Amino acid sequence: MKTIKLFIVDDSAVVRQTFSKLVEGDPQIELLGVAADPIFAMNKFKAYGLPDVLISDIEMPRMDGITFLKKMMQEHPIPVIICSAVAGEGSQKAIEALHSGAVEVIGKPKLGTKRFLENAKAELIDSIKAASKAKVGKIVSKAIRTKEDTISSVDDVVASKTVASSGIGARVIAIGSSTGGVQVLENILSSLPSRTVPILITQHMPAGFTASLAKRLDQLCNIRVKEAQTGDKLEPSTAYIAPGDKHMLIKRNGLHYSIVTKDGPKVSRHRPSVDVLFRSVANEAGKSAVGFILTGMGEDGARGMKEMFDKGGKTYAQDEQSCIVYGMPKEAVKRGGVFKSLDIRSIIEAIINVR
């Protein structure tokens, strides 16, 4: 079995040491080296060769992490995981990193870094292994996954209805995405005209990042993009992004829908969960719903998409060729819940044609 060569760049000795210890003992990961800043790292690359996966901080001396990331993407594209502060300016820069080619973001709190990273050991190792398989040089990106001791069922958050709500409701689009999703979402949403049906998006991200993502997309797109809040009424030409660390559901009121965000257990190790959104949309919108499952690792969304399909919704998956990680779409196809697989251009056209 080929080992994954890992390199860590962070000006914090605590972070470097903690990451190094966390990957010790895993037979699939080999620590190629560590460096306190990008200049030291690039010198070491010349001596030891390029790693398979790079973990990098953003705020560092001599060269910041985003400049380093862009340089690597231009000269030596390899999967990069960004380790960033989870609030304020840190989250905005992390979103920029995702748009610039990072495949993953690990949230780093200002306090308790060592304990946080140790608690996230399983997720960190999972992220490194997933990143090693990512298709870098296409559209790349993604957000965090955090520690989950137990795997909860979507039933613990929202019950499935035997049939969808009666009557004919307004059309609604639901999108689920994970690894690679940030740049794909930007590509899709920025290509839409100013008039669309309401769009609900669950992108795997933690608290502190989704507001920055929504703000950036709102500035780039013809439609309005906002972080969802409980009580929001679905309006045309608006995309609602599930807030980090909360599930997003919809509730039907006559012909219209409103949003409910809620806590609850993580589903498939995620909160927000795509399965939760898709089941809610299947319950409340039925045949009026259109679902898209995009690039991402794991199987979150596959079950919910099958429920949308079974209740008459039109369902689509991003095709393997255009995915950074063909995990979530693959699982949805395997479960028989996908009407058709499409490339990104065709997904854009399909959304435009929803009336």
Image: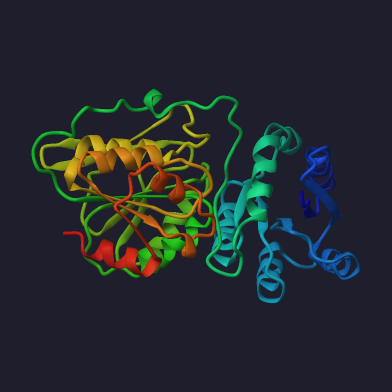
Q: Residue furthest bottom?
A: 75
In the depicted view, which residue is nearer to us: 145 or 286? Answer: 286
Q: Is residue 259 visible?
A: no
Horizontal side, residue 331 vs residue 76: left or right: left
- Location of residue 137 with respect to 277 vertically, above or below: below
Which corner quadrant of the image does residue 138 belong to?
bottom right
Q: Quadrant of the C terminus?
A: bottom left
Q: Position of residue 166 (x, y in %)?
A: 11, 34
Q: Residue furthest left?
A: 167
* Residue at horizontal 54 percent and vertical 55 percent from the top: 325
* Image label count: 0
* Residue at horizontal 38 percent and vertical 65 percent from the top: 188
Which corner quadrant of the image does residue 237 belong to?
bottom left
Q: Residue furthest right?
A: 47
- Location of residue 315 with respect to 246 vertically, above or below: below
Horizontal side, residue 189 vs residue 252: left or right: right
Q: Position of residue 344 (x, y in %)?
A: 39, 66
* Residue at horizontal 49 percent and vertical 34 percent from the top: 268
* Residue at horizontal 82 percent and vertical 49 percent from the top: 30
- Location of residue 15 with respect to 101 vertically, above or below: above
In the depicted view, which residue is nearer to us: 331 or 136? Answer: 331
Q: Position of residue 223 (x, y in %)?
A: 29, 63
Q: Position of residue 176 (x, y in %)?
A: 40, 48
Q: Is residue 328 visible?
A: yes
